[in-house]
Image: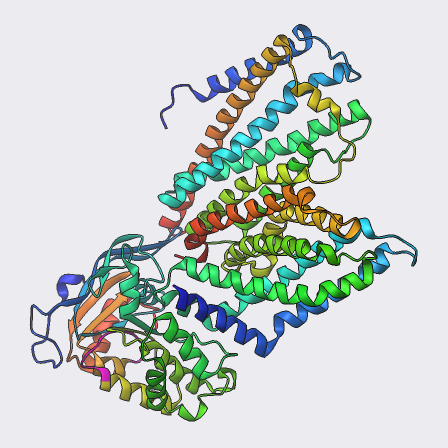
Amino acid sequence: MGRQFLAILRKDLIRELRTREMLVSMFLFVMLALVIFHYAFGVDDEADLTSLTGGMLWVTFVFAVLLGLNRSFAQEKDEQCLDGLLLCPVDRVTIFLAKAAGNLVFLLIIQAVSVPVFTLFFVERSYLPDLGLFILVLLLADLGICTLGTLLATISMNTRARDLLLPIVFLPLIVPVLIAATSATTAIFAEGADLGALLGRLGFLAAFDAVFLVAAYGTYDFAIGE
Amino acid sequence: MKKLVSAPALFAYAGALLVAGLLLGFYYAPTDASSMGYSQKIFYYHAPIAETALVAFGIAFVAAILYLRDPQPKWDRLGYASVRLGLLFSLLVMATGMIWGKAAWDAWWAWEPRLTTFLIVCFLYAAYFVLRQVVEEESRRATFAAVFAIVAFIDVPITFFAIRFMPEGLHPAVITATDTGMEGSMFLSFVISMAGMTLLLVALLRADVAAERLRDEIADLKTRIGG
Amino acid sequence: MDGSASETNPGAGGVPPAGAALEIEVDGLRKTFGRRDVLRGVSFTLERGGFLVMFGPNGAGKTTTLRVLATLLAPSKGSVRVAGHDVREDPMPVRRAVGLISHSPMLYLDLTAQENLRFYADMYRLDDREERITELLDRVELAHRRYDVVRTFSKGMRQRLAIARAILHRPRVLLLDEPHSGLDPRAVDILDGLLGEIREEHTFVMVTHHIEKGLELATRLMILDGGKIVWEHGAGVARDAFDAVYREHVQEGSVL
């Protein structure tokens, strides 16, 4: 399984680093959203947006992920590469894990670039002491987003609506992650929360990841085709 | 499925229980002592409708698993009908909840955890119909719908749980009050309404599944005669 | 009109003696898409080393049959065994044994020829990845384009690379879906040369509209129409005779 997993992941990474289709559009989208947020919420320079920071960040990421997920599967449909993939003697779950891992890598790249900019724009307090905690929130939320997103993008790609369907099915399902990640992030940006205060939310995100990893594991065979 | 009770009889039982529950709620159970007063009576319908909606989604969840294990059209019909009724009941939950909210705290809408959960549930299962709409081929449509019904049902309690992480705004002590120590007479009215509502779901589900089956048969016949 | 019309022509070359191992066994295969019956009871067997060519009008179910053999579609009813394994119960060994060439090349356009082949080599867990890739790129005359992105390839070059992709893992059974359509003459030559070379140790199922080529290559001929086998024959059918048979068995209005 390891070799096949790496082969799919490597192929997606090579492809993306060569074309930069996904990363460029995701990055520009995130940056534009931040600028728009500034004008939509920060009516004047004095306005304190601290209580909105978590929400702004995660809404942006969730929408950016939609762009990436659609691209990630559109390329499998081009030239019927998906058939080529399905012809291979590979467990469908391996395909799922590799695609989800690829999407996770892309999301992390986008976050690595955009979080510092976001901090510069909107966060007044230094949260350096809580950086580890913040990264933990990011990783746990990202994992859930990519797990569920990959499963649903696979289904969407196999329908007539393709990329139109994904937000409709993905957004209501991802609300719990959005809520937990948003409130945890806002807490860190606002007053610097300690591990104890965030433990409930971190545990919740981890449980979400685990539950939907199992659900995707059990249903991916059906999502990807016969 | 074996039909022990005819469809009209089932509807009649459901109706009788619902009326009985309502009458008991109004004339037997005491009127709420707190500020809610009479408006609390809607609870005897509101809560059973909510429970029934969740039961319907639960049936859809089980039907989805059965379909994926053994892809027979009957499981898809059951799942589809269950989600349809579940969504209908969820909309009723929203409506009764809003009416109650208006009466109890003079606001049509409050971001109360349960009501908010049902709002998200409505979006979730509306997506189920969009998904069905965009897949032409029946077996594939049924498969995708089943996968989604499973994921969606798992998401419902998680959503409810997650909403509690949000800072509390207008949180009605109203509803928590009904949770704690329900009086015997209130409980009886509630249970009878609940039984009536569940029977109503079963009756509707049976009728709906039968209608779907006829629709499928007609479509089959049409293709056979080259229509 | 049905399977019983099958006769083997003892004069035809390439047909192994009776009792040879069966590489493909299809019994009562049905495939429905929703309400549409695409295959309604297809049964045939093909011995190891055989070359089956399927003809038939569009929508007859030829491609569907190939996709079932390739495990891309699950049979609705009936049993299908390829290389000794059931496609539904035991798909992995079938996938290892099968190679598919279809009209779309199934190549990632933004990867180079080498990256594409490496990807598939890893998916099939080949031990001699680099040697095999070098060998095949030479064979399909693309060695000079090894490090070029497939997007820059002509249609014919892509199809040649697709051939390399399909036989990379040394499949025992090759499924060919209109392999000659859209090929430039050079690619046709390469494909035919390759087919000739590996003819001996492989079993083939080919779907084609190219009658000459089909009659020339086949050890078994088949016409599908409306999801059924309407005619079956051993090799050695002359072009004129075949045209007459085709007109006789396929509904009017169907174009070959």
Q: Nearer the viewer, residue B79 or A126?
A: A126
* Residue placed most toward the observer, C243 or B170: B170
A52 up-or-down from C8: above or below: above
Residue B117 x, y percent position in the rendering: 65, 37
In the depicted structure, whether residue B216 falls above or below residue C119 = above
- State the image coordinates of residue A170 (x, y, percent, origin top left): 60, 52
Q: Is residue B224 left or right of residue A176?
A: left
Residue at far front of view:
A129
* Colour setting: rainbow
Q: Nearer the viewer, residue B35 or A115?
A: A115
Residue lying at 50% horizontally and 58% vertically, measured from the top left:
A154
Foreground residue among A162 and C181: A162
Instruction: Determine if residue B9 is in view.
Output: yes
Please tell me whether residue B149 is drawn above or below residue C64 in the rendered image: above
* Position of the C terminus of chain C by quadrant: bottom left
Residue located at (52% from left, 60% from top)? A100
Q: Which residues are magenta?
A: C198-210
> In the displayed structure, would residue C241 be above or below residue A51?
below
Quarter of the rendering containing residue B116 = top right
How many numbered marks have been drawn onto this rendered protein structure? 0
**The N terminus of chain C sits in image quarter:** bottom left
As for residue C204 lying within the magenta part, the answer is yes
Residue B37 colored in magenta in the image: no
Q: Is residue B95 left or right of residue A35?
A: left
In this orientation, does residue C225 appear?
no
Q: Is residue B72 left or right of residue A126?
A: left
Could you tell me residue A31's position as x and y percent? 75, 66
Apparent side of residue A114 relative to residue A204 in the rendered image (left or right): right
Residue name at image x 27 percent, y 64 percent = C94
On the image, the x and y values in percent for residue C146 come to 44, 88
